[in-house]
Image (spheres, rainbow, N blue to C red):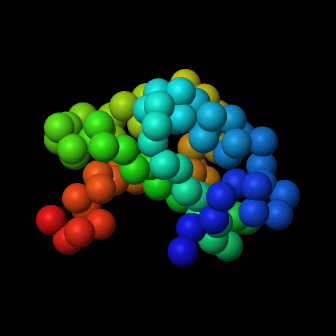
Amino acid sequence: MAQQVAQIPKCPKYVAELMSALQKLEPGAKLDVERRRGRGGYQYTIAVMSDRFESRGWRERHKRLWDAMYETLTDDQLGRVAVIALRPSDLNGE
C-alpha cells in the first residue's frame, strides 16, 4: 500500500523534512508515505503509527502531527500533504 520515501521517485524535499520532524516528534513510530496524482501535481499522505497513540484520543494525536506540519511546511505545501495518526489497534478493526 504505502511506500517508504526512498522508494518514491523524486520525493520532494519538504516531504522528507516533514517525515523527519514527525519521527522526532514520535520516536519509534512507523511512518509510511503514499503518493497520488492529483490536480496540480502529486499529493502525499503520511501514515504515522505509534504505540503511544493508544492512550491518546483522535484529536490529541492528530493535533500533534498537524502542529509539526504547520511548523515545517509552507501554506502551498500544506495543501499537498495529509497525515494520519494510527494506533496499532486501528489495524485490528478496533
| Residue shown at 63% from the left, 71% from the top | 36
* Image-based side of 80 in relation to 7, left or right: left
- Image quadrant holding the N terminus, namely bottom right
Question: Which quarter of the figure is the C terminus placed in?
Answer: bottom left
Foreground residue, 19 or 63? Answer: 19
Residue in the image at 65% along x and 58% along y: 4
Rendered location of residue 51, percent (x, y): 30, 43
Indicate the position of residue 44 as horizontal and vertical percent values.
60, 58
- Rendered location of residue 2, percent (x, y): 56, 67
Quadrant for residue 33, please give it: bottom right
Question: Residue 54 sits in which quadrant?
Answer: top left
Q: Nearer the viewer, residue 15 or 29?
A: 29
Foreground residue among 14 and 19: 19
- The percent position of residue 12, horizontal first and vertical second, equals 77, 49
Res 24 seen here: yes
**Residue at x 67% of width, y 73% of height:** 37
